[in-house]
């Protein structure tokens, strides 16, 4: 690859990181440039052989093609094609894997946190505008929850885990950086900005993600695992309780969640209640089609056939808000095995930051289909490509 084309590709990789917290519309042009630069690389064939010798890359491709194969027996082709469109980044993971330079990982992280900080500033403005509507004009807001939403481009459901990843990167830089006072002040300011945004965004999955990432950071910063776990026993519960009692938003969301669970039998039509209904029904659907599922995107069309009498008048979902149940109901145990293999290999071939992100997704995918949602799915694909090893496993050649 020529020096100028390599520079263009790297600038595009940085731009992708910057725009990850924005709408996907901003990301696609730069992703296309990354692919274009790779295709017109003079060593294209050699690099493709190297790419296709990686078990990690092959696993991402397999994950996509299983969804493509699932179109053969789906009863809802339109929903199936939408799912395929959402999974295209998994097919093209190898291009990011080739383009990402491990030595530039801190630059990619910086670009991501910078873009996220801009989005967070806009979210803070939206909060102020809601408090003082007579004095401030309406800002950029996603509008997913009407007047309650503060996230500028994404719903709180998607934005909160992205905020957690940004907070983790800043904490990581604190632990690994020098003692430059100016840099520390800037990082501390960014940390306060993102954390306060997470608190008032009320996205519960964001806190789940943050807890997992915080546990990883504590263990990695400790001299040995025993010391790390000893710290976790005290630090995590203390921080969780502090946030619960200090933030009224967080307290209300947590209390509402517990109340939804306690009153589920009397009132399943609540935020957590509906998720429990979707989980029960999706599992019933999986039991009826355990090996191959209902086909890609077949959940909604088949859902009503297994609806229990007590849940008949509730909404029919196209997403059970659980990644494991979604892929199990769509593609059966084969799809579930592919998802677990994807997590396993991503963890195995990533550095400590990549491992932390994988663990975070393993947990939050229990409460939402985050590999189905566009931005969180692309974030996973992007940062696994950045933090994974660059070694070719069959040809024993290193990507440069």
Image (tube, rainbow, N blue to C red):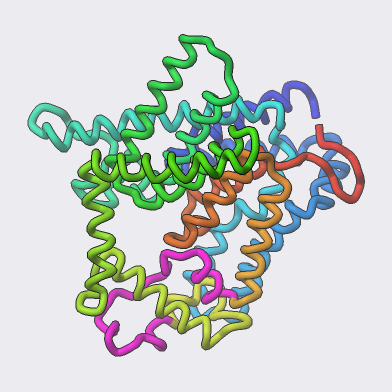
Residue 355 percent across, percent down from the top left: 63, 45
Residue 29 percent across, percent down from the top left: 56, 38
Residue 96 visible, this orientation: no
The relative height of residue 308 versus residue 77 in the rendered view (above or below) is below
The relative height of residue 177 versus residue 270 in the rendered view (above or below) is above
Q: Residue at x 24, y 56 (%)?
A: 255
Residue 366 percent across, percent down from the top left: 47, 62
Say if the magenta span includes residue 321: yes
Would you say 89 lies left or right of 20 here? Answer: right
Would you say 204 lies left or right of 7 here? Answer: left
As rendered, which of 164 and 246 lies closer to the eye? 246
Q: Quadrant of the C terminus?
A: top right
Q: Residue at x 55, y 37 (%)?
A: 217
**Number of marks in picture:** 0
Q: Residue furthest left?
A: 134
Q: Residue furthest right?
A: 395
Q: Residue at x 59, y 32 (%)?
A: 221
Residue 229 found in image quarter: top right
Q: Residue at x 57, y 51 (%)?
A: 359
Residue 361 percent across, percent down from the top left: 53, 53
Residue 229 visible, this orientation: yes
The relative height of residue 322 versus residue 73 in the rendered view (above or below) is above
Say if the magenta span includes residue 193: no
Which range is magenta? 303-331
Residue 211 found in image quarter: top left
């Amino acid at each position: 690859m020529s020096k100028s084309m390599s520079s263009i590709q790297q600038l595009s990789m940085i731009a992708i990181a910057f725009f990850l917290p924005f709408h996907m519309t901003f990301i696609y042009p730069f992703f296309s440039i990354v692919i274009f630069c790779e295709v017109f690389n003079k060593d294209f064939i050699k690099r493709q052989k190297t790419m296709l010798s990686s078990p990690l890359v092959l696993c991402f491709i397999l994950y996509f093609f299983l969804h493509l194969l699932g179109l053969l027996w789906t009863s809802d082709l339109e929903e199936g094609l939408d799912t395929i469109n959402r999974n295209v980044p998994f097919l093209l993971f190898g291009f990011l894997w080739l383009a990402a330079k491990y030595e530039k990982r801190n630059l990619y992280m910086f670009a991501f946190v910078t873009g996220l900080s801009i989005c967070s500033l806009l979210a803070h403005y939206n909060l102020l505008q809601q408090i003082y509507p007579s004095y401030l004009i309406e800002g950029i807001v996603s509008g997913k929850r009407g007047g309650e939403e503060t996230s500028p481009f994404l719903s709180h459901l998607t934005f909160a885990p992205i905020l957690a990843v940004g907070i983790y990167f800043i904490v990581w830089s604190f632990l690994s950086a020098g003692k430059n006072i100016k840099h520390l002040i800037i990082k501390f300011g960014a940390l306060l900005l993102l954390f306060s945004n997470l608190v008032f965004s009320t996205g519960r999955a964001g806190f789940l993600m943050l807890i997992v990432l915080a546990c990883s950071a504590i263990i990695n910063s400790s001299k040995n695992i025993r010391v790390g776990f000893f710290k976790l026993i005290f630090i995590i519960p203390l921080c969780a309780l502090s946030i619960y009692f200090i933030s009224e938003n967080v307290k209300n969301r947590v209390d509402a969640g517990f109340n939804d669970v306690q009153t589920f039998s009397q009132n399943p039509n609540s935020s957590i209640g509906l998720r429990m209904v979707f989980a029960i029904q999706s599992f019933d659907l999986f039991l009826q089609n355990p090996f191959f599922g209902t086909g890609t995107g077949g959940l909604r069309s088949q859902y009503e056939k297994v609806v229990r009498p007590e849940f008949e008048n509730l909404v029919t979902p196209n997403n059970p808000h659980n990644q494991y149940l979604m892929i199990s109901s769509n593609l059966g145990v084969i799809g579930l095995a592919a998802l677990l293999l994807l997590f396993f290999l991503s963890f195995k071939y990533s550095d400590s930051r990549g491992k932390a992100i994988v663990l975070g997704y393993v947990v939050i995918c229990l409460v939402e289909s985050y590999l189905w949602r566009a931005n969180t799915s692309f974030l996973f694909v992007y940062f696994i490509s950045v933090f994974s090893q660059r070694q070719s496993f069959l040809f024993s050649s290193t990507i440069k």
